[in-house]
Image: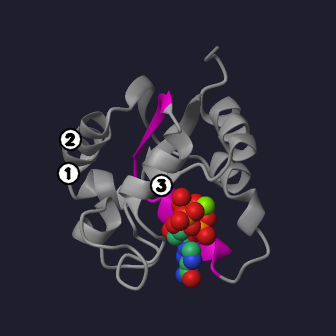
Amino acid sequence: MTDRTLVLIKPDGVARRYVGEILGRVEKKGLSIVALELKTVSRELASAHYAEHESKPFFPDLLEFITSGPVVAAVLEGPRAIAAFRQIAGGTDPVAKAVPGTIRGDLALDGQQNLVHGSDSVESAEREIALWFPGLV
Ligand code: RTP
Ligand code: MG
């Protein structure tokens, strides 16, 4: 089953110069990049992207972080792309959840500044791809 997922390299990943490292891991896994853009994120886009977390205590901090510098947004395609990217990303907390060998497990320490986002379901992926790449068919 081929699917598509929306991936972000968050501002910490761009600032730490891990764009090549992270896209390299994506390509080595076998996923295809079908859209790619360096983008400064408005508060509107950030709020829409993370709407599911609007009521959480960390939401204001999360918005500050995601809008703090450019991100790389990508659409990846391949067999089970949604699950495959979340597998190589590792769990949300880079120490307590992500294991060595994953992007977060190898390269991150902080529970918020955890380098990458990947859609968590087919529904999220469709919503997020429409939000970030409205022209993509
Ligand atoms: P993402 O949405 O960014 O791919 O990450 P995720 O699915 O692994 O985690 P999620 O629960 O959706 O959380 C979204 C992002 O919010 C930040 N966060 N901070 N301070 C906190 O307790 C906390 N919890 C989550 C992280 O940047 C997380 O990736
Ligand atoms: Mg999430």
Q: Nearer the viewer, mark 2 or mark 1?
A: 2
Q: Which residues are magenta?
A: 58-78
Secondary structure under the numbered disc 3 in the rendered image: helix
Q: Residues within 10 Å of mark 3 (few under 14, many from 20)?
A: many
Left or right of 97 in this view: 17: left
Q: Is residue 94 above or below residue 74?
A: below
Residue 128 placement: quadrant = top right
- Residue holding disc 1: 17
Residue at 49% in and 54% down: 117
Separation (CA) of disc 2 from disc 3: 18 Å
Name the residue beneath numbered marker 2.
Answer: 20
- Cα separation, mark 3 vs mark 1, equals 21 Å
Place residue 87 in its image quadrant.
bottom left
Residue density around tag 2, few if under 14, some if 14–19, many if 20 or more, within 10 Å: few
Q: Position of residue 46 (x, y in %)?
A: 63, 53
**Dot 2 and dot 1 residues touching (CB under 8 Å):** yes
Distance from disc 2 to disc 1, alpha carbons, whole Å, reads 7 Å
Q: Which residue is mark 3?
A: 86
Element under disc 1: loop
Mark 3: amino acid: Arg
The kind of secondary structure element at disc 2 is: helix
From the image, state whether disc 2 or disc 3 is nearer to you: 3
